[in-house]
Amino acid sequence: MVGVVLRLNHILVLTLCILMVSVFYVGFSTASDKGRRYYEESGQMLWDINTDEKIVAITLDDGPHPRYTGQILDLLAKYRVKATFFVIGENAEKHPELVLRTYKEGHELANHTYTHKYNQPINVLENELKKTNDIIHSITGFYPVLFRPVGGQYTDKMIDVATRNGYKVVIWSWHQDTLDWKEIKSQKIINKVVNGTSPGNVILFHDGGGNRTQTIKALKKIIPELQKQGYKFVTVSELIDINEDQNDDDILKDFK
């Protein structure tokens, strides 16, 4: 009898331990990584949108650059295309004329931190976001509302601080990282984008951070080719507005 009681107690203790570990694990997982679905549904983050409309957003990181940004702006003007530039604050400070030109030509300016450093403490990141926004505002009179984490790497705490400061966090369509940051040949960039583009994509390019000659060569082919396929290029904020309008229409349909 005593042996039976001891075995039952042992089973009870093991069961309680398993339950406690399970509860802890679920809680930890939720707290440390809420995941793409959660952040998209909450409206805090964007990768791309689901739409049948042939629209895409070109995004350019790490500028402005004194050699390449101007060439890219010339190209965008030639094809009457609008893009979104995720600006590094210290580069904006060095080249305010390019920031102003980008803004005046109707492109969207967004925040890409001040120093472009990975894994910053949250308080440092918050200060860098403010500093970069203040710099852009001092040049243009405009405060960016979009933020892209360095390398697309994020944590829940990072998203919390960005949201608290009024930003929407923008990544990109995972299949639309052009890899131009590796300075690969332009034809590889062209093939990747032209063959992989679908409606609602956010495409990642760079106008700074290295030699962007191949990026410019690729854009000269990509833009007219996608236009020939019927695509329209929009800013990220325009993409967000279209997505919200579609969601509102879906809600109205369900209501009816």
Image (tube, rainbow, N blue to C red):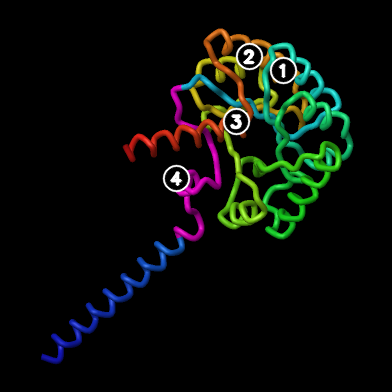
Question: Which numbered circle lies on residue 149?
Answer: none
At 59% from the left edge and 9% from the top edge, which residue is drawn? 225
Q: Is tag 3's residue or tag 1's residue first in the polypeptide sequence?
A: 1
Q: Magenta residues, as a range?
A: 29-52
Marks 4 and 3 in Cβ contact (< 8 Å)? no
* Cα distance between the residues tagged 3 and 1: 17 Å
Q: Is residue 225 visible?
A: yes
Residue on which the image places disc 2 = 223
SS of the residue at dot 3? helix
Q: What residue type is disc 3 on?
A: Glu
Q: Is tag 2's residue or tag 4's residue first in the polypeptide sequence?
A: 4
* Cα distance between the residues tagged 1 and 2: 9 Å
* Cα distance between the residues tagged 2 and 4: 30 Å
Residue 248: image x %, image y %? Answer: 45, 37
Q: Is tag 1's residue or tag 2's residue first in the polypeptide sequence?
A: 1
Q: Nearer the viewer, mark 3 or mark 2?
A: 3
Q: Between 71 and 240, which is closer to the camera in this rendering?
A: 240
Q: Is tag 1's residue or tag 4's residue first in the polypeptide sequence?
A: 4
Magenta segment: does it hold 134?
no
Within 10 angstroms of label 1, few (less than 14), some, or many (20 or more) residues? some
Residue on which the image places disc 3 = 238
At 60% from the left edge and 17% from the top edge, which residue is drawn? 188
SS of the residue at dot 2? helix
Residue on which the image places disc 4 = 37
Residue 107: image x %, image y %? Answer: 72, 27
Q: Between 182 and 216, which is closer to the camera in this rendering?
A: 216
Q: What residue type is disc 4 on?
A: Arg
